[in-house]
Every structure is written in C-alpha cells, then in structure tokens.
C-alpha cells in the first residue's frame, strides 16, 4: 500500500520514478507549534499509483524539491500550508504548476473549504479516518496509525483530481481553476513589503499616527520572529498591537495592563515597545488613512455591485463567493478611492475575471467617487 522512505539510497528510487512521471499527488505532515517556520515530519507522494512516505527528519530532499518545481502538475487538496512549507525548505518561490482539488470543488459549488475527508466521501464515496491530525510527526518511530493516515492523504487524491477535472472541463471552468491555483501559490509566496506591514493590522478607524505606531511595532515584531524563529503571537498578537496603539501606554505599569501582552515581553522588551509608540518620524512620513470597507459606498452602488456579481455567477454557474471575495472588493474600492494602478490589484482580478467583473466594477465604483471621497474626508 505504501513505502516509508528514510534512507537516502531508497529515495533515489522515488526520484527515478518521478523523472518518468510528470504528475504527482502530494501532501505534508509537519509541526508548527512554537516556530515561525514549519518542521517537516513526513512528505507524502503518489507517483503513478505508488505511495511513498518520505521522512522529513532524515532525508536530504534537495533533488525532490527540484523535481516538484519542474513537474507538469502537482496535485494537492487545500495546498496553502504545504506550499508554504515547500517554499521554506526549497528556498524557492515560484511553484506555478499546482492543481488544488479544494479550489476545483469550490467552483463546482461545494464551498470554499471542503475538507479532504468530505471531498472523498462526496466525489468517490470513500471514507477515511482523520484521527491523527494532531500527531507528533517528528517523533520516531511513527506508529502504524500515523503512517496509514499519512498514506491515505495521497492514496486517493489522483482519482479525486480526475473526477473534479472532468467536471470542470465539462463546464469550461478548468482553465479558470488552474489560473486561480497559480494566483494562490503566488499569494503564498508574497510577503507584505516592509513599509506596508501596518496594512495587515490597521483598519480605517485608525488615525495616521496610530498607523505609524502600528508600522513601527510591525517591523520590530517581524525582525524579532525571524531572528528567533518564533510565531508572531509569541512576541505580540495583532489584536494586542491594536490595543497598544489605542491605549498608548506611557510606562511599564500601563503597558502591563494591555490585554494579551505577555509578562516576559514587558520584562524583556517593555522599553523598546514604549519607545516605538513614542518616538515617531515626522508627520509627512506617516501612512495615509486606510479606506473604509466597500460596504460604506452609497446604497445604490452597493446594490448594483451585488447585482452584477450575481448576474455573472448565474451565467457562469460559479458561486458568488468564488467569483469575488470581500478582500478583493475592498482592493477595488481602495484602488478607485486612491486612483491606484491596476497592476497593483490582486492577481485574481487581472486574469479571467478582468473583463467579466473587474472592469465593470471599477466603472460602477467610479460613478460613486464623490460619495467615496466624501466618506474619506469624514474619516480624516
């Protein structure tokens, strides 16, 4: 049923098979509890119907990463964390040959986050156990239960992919799904530019001063977590950073009362945090206010936007939530308010959605520009 590979010589056999087969079914098991970057336990691969469990704790996988990047297609289900792990270990970030069965199923009306277990039951009428999700994948030896669980994650994935692809092709949606998968892998590879880190935490309610404080805290936190390889929440949770700029503590006593801040962080870094809140650049260097969410556009335009998306959804037979996410709509709103460059929009909006949705939505929002600009002034 499967082979556990923990010797470099045995890995050569797998690599040889990969060189003769261009499509692989893939999954990973890892631990990411107290680190910023994942620790690989097992990498599962289905090569031409043969399942191998690669020991991430002993093997040199450099050649394996190389084969993945040159493959015709890598098949995953819910690939986000797997791709992130591959990028980290391969030290390379352009895996553009992915087909994600979860993305495919979302186009077919099964929700944005259908689980692998539910997908197998839905499409293939196969039941698998998912009782080893929280296992210690770094412990050795692995139990039989762990290995069976890991093998099941790729044993059926190629059959699942074939069925999903066939239905997508029949509905002329397969190329759209592949494009969305490319955008997803690009999104995973993209780090927020250092000078825009405040955008991941702040919102339209924050003043320019508060956004500057968030920016300074964010840069410091990012440098800390990368130096220590710790989760961001171990230094400062994002919610705690928002509380910090809203409370604006002036001393360690006030700092200690901020919700969610760890005593050891106050003890070791209290002075640094207080200084970051207090000592700011000149006001002309502070970030601009963040645009309000699109729901703040005028009532008429809000209705027209929804009607347009509904119409395209009906014509394509693709769910509305797949066609347009809230964050993409907000990006369009921000683009119109600040007269942005279209090339800075999310990639999802520049491909097959561009003529169908992006351009018409921009035209609709531009009709509302006076109202939107007025909202921005109210927000100043």
Image: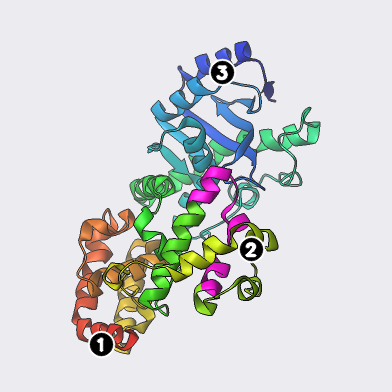
- Name the side, left or right, on which 2 lies relative to 13: right
Q: Which residue is mark 1?
A: 374
Q: CA distance from mark 1 to mark 3?
A: 62 Å
CA neighbours of label 1 inside 10 A, class few (<14), some (14 to 19), many (20+) = few
The part of the image, by quadrant, that contains residue 234 is bottom right
Q: Which residue is mark 3?
A: 14
| Residue 317 visible in the picture | no
Task: Examine the residues drawn in magenta and state their main secondary structure.
Answer: helix
- Name the side, left or right, on which 144 lies relative to 37: right
Q: Which residues are magenta?
A: 223-244
Image label count: 3
For image coordinates 25% across by 87% down, the residue present is 374
Q: Is residue 44 magenta?
A: no
Are circles 1 and 3 on residues that touch, CB within 8 Å?
no
Which numbered disc, 3 or 2, marks the residue that appears first in the sequence?
3
Residue 115 placed where, x, y %? Answer: 61, 52
The image quadrant where one finds the C terminus is bottom left
Q: Which residue is mark 2?
A: 266
- Name the side, left or right, on which 37 lies relative to 94: right
């Amino acid at each position: 049923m499967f082979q556990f590979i923990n010797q470099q010589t045995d890995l050569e056999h797998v690599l040889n098979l990969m060189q003769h087969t261009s499509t692989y079914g893939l999954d990973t098991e890892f631990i990411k509890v107290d680190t910023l970057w994942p620790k690989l336990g097992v990498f599962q691969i289905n090569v031409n119907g043969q399942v191998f469990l690669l020991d991430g704790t002993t093997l040199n996988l450099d050649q394996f990463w190389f084969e993945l990047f040159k493959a015709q297609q890598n098949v995953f289900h819910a690939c986000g964390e797997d791709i992130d792990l591959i990028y980290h270990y391969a030290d390379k970030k352009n895996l553009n040959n992915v087909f994600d069965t979860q993305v495919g199923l979302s186009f077919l009306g099964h929700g944005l986050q259908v689980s692998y277990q539910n997908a197998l039951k839905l499409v293939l009428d196969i039941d698998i156990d998912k009782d080893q999700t929280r296992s210690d994948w770094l412990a050795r030896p692995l139990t039989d239960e762990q290995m069976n669980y890991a093998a099941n994650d790729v044993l059926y994935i190629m059959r699942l992919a074939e069925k999903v692809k066939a239905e997508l092709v029949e509905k002329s949606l397969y190329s759209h799904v592949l494009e969305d998968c490319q955008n997803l892998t690009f999104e995973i590879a993209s780090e927020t530019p250092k000078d825009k880190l405040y955008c991941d935490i702040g919102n339209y309610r924050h003043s320019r001063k508060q956004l500057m404080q968030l920016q300074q805290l964010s840069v410091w936190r990012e440098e800390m977590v990368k130096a220590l390889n710790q989760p961001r929440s171990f230094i400062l949770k994002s919610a705690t950073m928002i509380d910090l700029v809203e409370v604006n503590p002036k001393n360690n006593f006030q700092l200690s009362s901020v919700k969610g801040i760890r005593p050891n962080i106050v003890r070791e870094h209290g002075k640094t945090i207080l200084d970051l809140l207090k000592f700011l650049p000149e006001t002309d260097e502070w970030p601009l206010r963040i645009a309000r969410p699109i729901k703040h556009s005028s009532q008429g335009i809000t209705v027209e936007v929804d009607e347009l998306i509904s119409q395209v959804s009906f014509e394509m037979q693709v769910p509305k939530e797949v066609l347009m996410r809230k964050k993409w709509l907000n990006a369009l709103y921000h683009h119109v308010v600040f007269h942005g460059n279209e090339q800075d929009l999310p990639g999802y909006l520049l491909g097959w959605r561009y003529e169908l949705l992006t351009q018409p939505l921009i035209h609709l929002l531009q009709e509302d520009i006076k109202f939107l600009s007025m909202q921005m002034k109210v927000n100043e």
